[in-house]
Amino acid sequence: MTYIISICSGKGGVGKTNVVINLGMALKNLGKDVTLLDANLTAPNLGLNLGFSKIPITLNDALKGRNHITEAVYIHSSGIKVLPASIALKDLSDVYPEKLKEAYSDLKKNSELVIVDNAPGLGREVVNSIKNSDEILVVTNPDLASVTDALRTVKLAKNLKIPIRGIVLTRFNESKYELSISEVESIIGEKIISIIPEDDFVKSSIKQKSSVITLYPKSKSSLAYKKLASDILGMKFNEEYKEDITNIHKLLRFFGFRK
Ligand SMILES: Nc1ncnc2c1ncn2[C@@H]1O[C@H](COP(=O)(O)OP(=O)(O)O)[C@@H](O)[C@H]1O
Ligand SMILES: [Mg+2]
């Protein structure tokens, strides 16, 4: 039985695509058969983030009825399945988000878990994607604009009667200028189930077209993504973040505090 989890936000640029890639990769490492699907039809970048540039058959071809959806599934070097949307503007014509229903159900026999990367906003592509998912995760940053947009997404999912697993608070910096955890929870009215810290290793992994959990498995963001995956599967997680003391030692040595 395939289970479809939609990663949504409301506001763009909050870290959805990175949650899709890293949560998906972590679930795969825990033994699940995972497919990452790009339902951000108007501005797709899941494939690009994973190094797929020339893609012969995409989700758009499946939505147009030209190909079966399983023909648009590619295997990343990590072994995870990826279903990219087309980045070519011409491939947007005659693509109707209503067809996502058929695409998702055709995919159902092909994978154990499907993690969907969604467009920002509350347009037709988002509505149709949420409607055909088993549950959603709502990604937000600790600022008023993204939290307000996250609340609108939560309300949409409730109207559509789709379960909300919780909030993933990304790019968390513990700065006094950010909203606090309790403020975020009380505005949105849902629990924060994961906090992904701001971490330059995420940016570095994007540049290298891979996931942070593959390239920097001990980084603080990797541990947070892996914990979220374990929690979703109801598994115990007991890795702990250890500061890279070698860099601190180098710094102390530089300032003469250490030999
Ligand atoms: N945990 C993080 N730490 C640092 N930067 C991040 C983190 N998550 C996302 N980013 C940055 O935010 C940008 C937007 O992330 P992305 O996943 O593409 O957002 P969305 O899919 O919501 O538009 C990325 O290019 C990356 O630079
Ligand atoms: Mg994105």
Image (cartoon, rainbow, N blue to C red):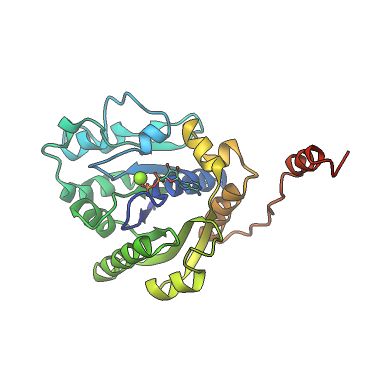
Which quadrant of the structure image shows residue 70? top left
Q: Is residue 154 above or below residue 38?
A: below
Q: Position of residue 22 (x, y in %)?
A: 49, 45
- Residue located at (18% from left, 32% from top): 89
Is residue 68 visible to the viewer in this orientation of the structure? yes
Q: Position of residue 180 (x, y in %)?
A: 50, 69
The reply, left or right, for residue 31 in relation to residue 152 is right
Front-most of 165 and 89?
89
- Residue located at (34% from left, 43% from top): 37
Q: Position of residue 143 (x, y in %)?
A: 41, 62
Q: Residue furthest right?
A: 259
The reply, left or right, for residue 5 in relation to residue 123 is right
The quadrant the C terminus occupies is top right
Front-most of 31 and 82?
82
Front-most of 237 and 121?
121
Q: Residue furthest left?
A: 94
